[in-house]
Structure formats: C-alpha cells, structure tokens
Amino acid sequence: MRIVKWVFWVTVWVLVAAFFHYTLPQTDIVRVTDTYEKRIDFGNSSIFWAGSATDSAGLAVNRDVFFIQTRRAKGDVMVYRNEDTGWGWPPYFKFDTANLQAEAADARSTTGAPQYYALKHYGWRSELLSIYPNAISLRAVEGPEASKGIPFVTIIVLTLVAALFYAIWVRWRRFRRARLDPRIEAIEDDFAARRGRFARWRAERRARK
C-alpha cells in the first residue's frame, strides 16, 4: 500500500512539474539563421499547437504557421514556431506574430558575422512528435555569453503556486485533525469493541460445549 501511495504522489508531482516546465517562459541565446512559413496538418500532436483563438482558423485541421530557425549559443540547432496565443492558454496574450516574424527576418545573420538575440519562448521541441516551442519575444544581446536575465515571471508564479499548495496542505491537516481523525478513531474503537464482544461470545460458546 505504501508503494502505491508513493507511485501515485510521484506521478502527480511529475505531471505538475511537466506542466509548469512546458508553460512557463524560458530564454535561449540564439543566432537567427532563417525564417519561413509552412502549412501544417495537425494530427495527434494538435494539443501542442496554439488554437489560433484570434481567428476562425482554430477550427481548421491545417493552417500556415510561421517558423524561426536558429542556432543556439552552444552550437545546436533549434527551430521555433511563431503563433499567436490570443486569449487562450497559456495566457501570454500574444497577438503580434507578424511583427515578431518581421523582427526575426531582420535579425538573420551568418556564421562570419553573427548577431545574437535572447529569444523568449515556452513549450518543448520533439522531433518524434513534430512539436516546436512557441517564440514570444526577441531582443538583441551583446554576444553568446550574454545574460538571459532574471526569470521574474517564473519566480513569481512558482512562489504563488507553492504558497497555494502550502495553504491547502495546512487547511487539509487542520480539517483532518479536527474532523476525520476523531471519526476514524471512533470507527476503529467501535470495530475493536465489536471484535472483542465477538471473541468473548465465541469463548463462551466453546466453554458451554
């Protein structure tokens, strides 16, 4: 029983961590190598694409999507999609996809004359599932070793969530001590008393025989 309990809670916390890792913003130092637009047919991975809540295209099975090709400061290649989030989830309220694509196109540079940018995004990259992180903003930095900045949004959100979980846990403990534990103890005592009476009844029957 204890193993089942541990497996349950580990699974819950892994899912919670995955949710926040996907949703919260992250920043990469990149060199933009190219930009393009491609029509995407959404399949089983449609949950990882923005719903285009800003227009009726959210109901379509395919649509044109902007992409930004980059090479990160560490040397590996990363491709980002560039979609509006609109009023949907996650709540980035991004409506400037076309402007960001224009900025990315203007930020392109070569290996011989590199220009680096801090690209903020959310989401994951999976070649197997054909999903891409969604670019949020782009700003110029001095070089590949530039600071990514302090993740204020992530710190604030995680602090609020931790405070909420702690408040729920404290109230649950108080409720359990005040309401559940006494009832559980009463049930256990009643069961023990019934079991004692049954044992005495059996002993009396055996004695009569």
Image (cartoon, rainbow, N blue to C red):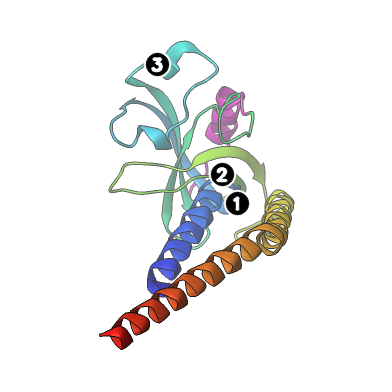
In the rendered image, which quarter contains the C terminus? bottom left
Percent x, y of residue 136: 59, 37
Percent x, y of residue 66: 45, 29
Give the SS element for disc 2.
strand
The relative height of residue 160 versus residue 178 in the rendered view (above or below) is: above
Segment tinted magenta in the rendering? 94-113
Q: What number is the disc on residue 27?
A: 1
For residue 149, which quarter of the picture? bottom right
Q: What number is the disc on residue 143?
A: none
Determine which residue is flagged by label 2.
Answer: 121
Left or right? Give the position of 209 relative to 85: left
Q: Residue at x 60, y 45 (%)?
A: 120
Q: Amino acid at mark 3?
A: Leu
Q: Nearer the viewer, residue 43 or 126?
A: 43
- The reply to whether the C-beta atoms of the residues labelled 2 and 1 are less than 8 Å apart is yes
Q: Residue at x 62, y 40 (%)?
A: 138
Q: Nearer the viewer, residue 111 or 83?
A: 83
- The reply to whether the C-beta atoms of the residues labelled 3 and 2 are less than 8 Å apart is no
Percent x, y of residue 18: 48, 54
Determine which residue is flagged by label 3.
Answer: 59
> Is residue 35 highlighted in magenta?
no
Q: Residue at x 49, y 74 (%)?
A: 192
Tell which circle, 2 or 1, labels the residue nearer the N-terminal end: 1
